[in-house]
Amino acid sequence: MRLLSLLPLVLVAGCFNPNLDDGVLGCSTAKTCPAGYSCLGDNRCYHSGRNYDLSVGPFYGTGALGDLTLTGSGILLADPTTGQLKFDLGSEVLPAGQPGFTKVDQSNGVSVGIWNFRNITIPRAITVSPSSNSTAILAFAATGTLDLEGSVVVDALGARGGAPGVAGNGVTSGANKQGGNAAAVDASAGGGGGGGNGTNGEKGGGNSGGAGGSIIGTSATPMTFGGGGGGGGSAKQSDGGVGGNGGGGIALLAAHLKIAGAITANGGLGRASPTKPAGIATGGGGGGAGGSILLSSDDITFVGGSSGDGGAGTLMTAVGRAGADGTNSGGTGGAGGLGRISLFGTVTGSASATPQAASNPSPIGNFPE
């Protein structure tokens, strides 16, 4: 670390290696780099043009972490805050804090954890999912090929649902919206509103049902968390239902993407009153909205499965989930809105996608913003 801190002083003296690898050199205190290099969000210097802005050109990573070739089966927990990759049964694949992983903060929005590999292979028997209580979008970047036959699952790992009678949350680049709530009003027992993302959440049922959550973000800023559903109401606020979490965010960025598995960013179900008081009406919690899926590549190939090899083909879903039923005639929670699925690149083959994937032949905006 001491050597890296001295490198900027050496460069001023003219002893700069023009072939210095991306990410080796730290930015100056003024966030500057030598000519031909740019200071990126991890405060490292990269060749100009290799940046996180998809409106300038695709970002496929730096390859600093080498190849990721997974074998066997199980759930690989990815921590988009520290960079650790660890199987749920304890085997560590990548320690936290490795150069080549960076956490980038979006302006007024959700942070993004980016792993920079050369090639990535995820076999059918492996599921990749963020570690518990994740607060950042998961992004895998590959300078070569990313081959996904397994699954990437970020269901209900977005904005948190609301407690009884409390609005759910929703955070995105440039916006801070909320899922609807249904707090007690004169002993009403309305259902919580569904969280919003690509579409509005549904209004909760019953008296004083919560409003649905607003649309979050746009097609030009697609990487958002799904909004959480609102909590249900009751005469005693703590007796209401609990809102479901919104779906998380996943970005797969590679020069060549081959997708034959499943990618899901669905919201979570609303929940009924945890106390279920006898004879007291309670509103159900609203459902969480779907999250966000982004695929960016020079060529995206969707591979269909067959009964012979046991494959099911590519499945991508980012849907909201239903709200919970009320008790004793209380209102039902509203359903969460749809998330977003965005494709950037030339697409071959087809996938089963809900909502329908938005294919963008031109740059889709900043990633991260």
Image: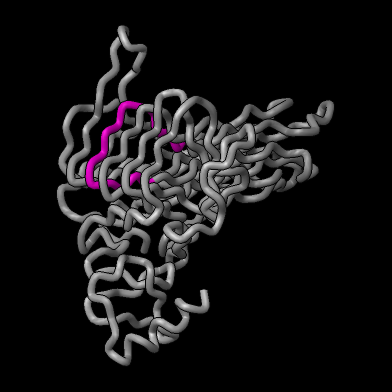
Can you say whether 133 is above or below 47 in the image?
Answer: above
Residue 306: x and y, percent? 28, 12
Kindly report the secondary structure that dominates the magenta region of the rendered protein: strand
The image position of residue 129, as x and y in percent, is: 51, 38
In the shown orientation, is residue 278 left or right of residue 309? right
Q: Residue at x 29, y 17 (%)?
A: 305
- Range shown magenta: 251-265
Q: Is residue 222 left or right of residue 246?
A: left
Query: Is residue 261 highlighted in magenta?
Result: yes
Q: Is residue 228 among what the camera can see?
A: yes
Q: Quadrant of the C terminus?
A: bottom left
Instruction: Answer with left or right where residue 55 lies relative to residue 243.
Output: left
- The residue depicted at 45 percent of the width and 76 percent of the height is 4
Q: Which of the colour schemes (rainbow, by chain, secondary structure, one colour) is used?
A: one colour
| Residue 263 image point, x, y percent | 39, 33
Q: Nearer the viewer, residue 368 or 17?
A: 17
Q: Is residue 307 above or below residue 323?
A: above
Query: Residue 345 location in percent, x, y?
Result: 19, 45
